[in-house]
């Protein structure tokens, strides 16, 4: 089993619009180990979301290799990439995107049922995850009846529902107050350490980023370690 849940080797990516070319990554390298939570801190527009999309196989680099759990992905078909993404990657966004008509429990159970689990097993796991994230007592409520921090913790439970090796989070605490941000970040840390999975988390919040195992930034097309 690979020690690296995410590896970018010599990755280049540019947006092209007509004659214009916006180079986001150029020969960039990044590793995220099993059990490691890495914070990604860079100014708005630097390319954080793009990097998360590349890591989550939502985009293909124009050059270089993205490997997930030791498996190279550049030669895979779209269908194979989708299968790999479903099996290994969980996403958390700034706005939770929970399904409004369903309870917190159902929001965490549904992705597991889509992946083939029975309703009973999916609900059991959903309950365990919501408990461990401190939102068990809110399990039967719909998203609109939850606070922002509770909604985000449910979104984290949903991202973790199918046991992904890698959680990719895009400003998950971006619209939360500092105390709630801390709670949500703690929840992510506990999850990563307990499951020995990995996370790459884009954040503007330097206080939170300092609590990650490592901080990286994105500049001039390269990814480098950042000391905060
Ligand atoms: P961040 O997440 O750090 O704010 P993004 O990855 O969203 O940065 O965007 C990086 C740059 O790429 C920005 O200048 C943005 O405007 C541009 N960009 C993002 N998506 C596209 C796209 N689909 N087409 C063209 N340019 C894009």
Image: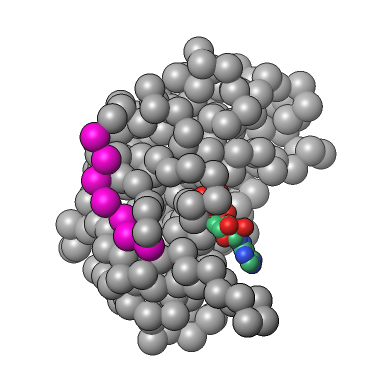
Q: Which residue does the image show at 39% across and 27% down from the upper left?
A: 206
Quadrant where the C terminus lies? top left
Is 31 located above or below residue 58 in the figure? above
When asked about the image quadrant of residue 123, the answer is: top right
Q: Which residue does the image show at 38% across and 44% down from the upper left?
A: 40
Quadrant where the N terminus lies? bottom left
Q: Position of residue 218 (x, y in %)?
A: 37, 52
Q: Residue furthest front?
A: 19
Q: Quadrant of ligand 1?
A: bottom right
When asked about the image quadrant of residue 105, the answer is: top right
Q: Position of residue 20 (x, y in %)?
A: 61, 76
Q: Nearer the viewer, residue 119 or 185?
A: 185
Q: Is residue 142 left or right of residue 79?
A: right
Q: Is residue 84 left or right of residue 149?
A: left
Q: Residue furthest right?
A: 101
The part of the chain drawn in magenta is 221-227
Is 31 located above or below residue 96 in the figure? below
Q: Nearer the viewer, residue 140 or 191?
A: 191
Q: Position of residue 66 (x, y in %)?
A: 34, 70
Asked whether residue 67 is in view, the answer is no
* Number of numbered markers: 0
Is 30 located above or below residue 71 in the figure? above
Reply yes or no: does residue 4 show up in magenta. no
Q: Which residue does the image show at 69% across and 41% down from the upper left?
A: 98
Q: What colouring style does the render use? A: one colour
Q: Which residue does the image show at 54% across and 81% down from the upper left?
A: 79
Asked whether residue 181 is in view, the answer is yes
Q: Nearer the viewer, residue 139 or 180?
A: 180
């Amino acid at each position: 089993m690979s020690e690296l849940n995410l590896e970018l080797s010599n990755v280049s990516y540019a947006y092209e619009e007509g004659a214009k070319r916006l180079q986001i990554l150029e020969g960039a390298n990044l590793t995220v180990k099993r059990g490691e939570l890495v914070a990604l801190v860079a100014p708005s527009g630097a390319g954080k979301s793009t990097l998360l999309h590349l890591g989550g196989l939502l985009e293909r680099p124009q050059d270089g290799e993205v490997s997930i759990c030791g498996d190279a992905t550049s030669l895979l078909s779209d269908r194979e990439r989708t299968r790999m993404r479903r099996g290994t990657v969980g996403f958390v966004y700034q706005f939770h995107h929970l399904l409004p008509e369903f309870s917190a429990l159902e929001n965490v159970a549904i992705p597991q049922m889509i992946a083939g689990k029975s309703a009973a097993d999916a609900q059991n796991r959903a309950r365990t995850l919501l408990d461990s994230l401190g939102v068990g007592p809110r399990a039967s409520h719909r998203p609109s009846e939850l606070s922002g921090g509770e909604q985000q913790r449910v979104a984290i439970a949903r991202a973790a529902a199918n046991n992904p090796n890698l959680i990719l989070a895009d400003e998950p605490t971006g619209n939360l107050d500092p105390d709630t941000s801390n709670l949500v970040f703690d929840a992510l840390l506990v999850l990563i350490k307990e499951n020995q999975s990995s996370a790459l988390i884009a954040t503007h919040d330097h206080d939170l980023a300092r609590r990650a195992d490592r901080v990286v930034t994105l500049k001039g097309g390269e990814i480098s370690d950042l000391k905060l």
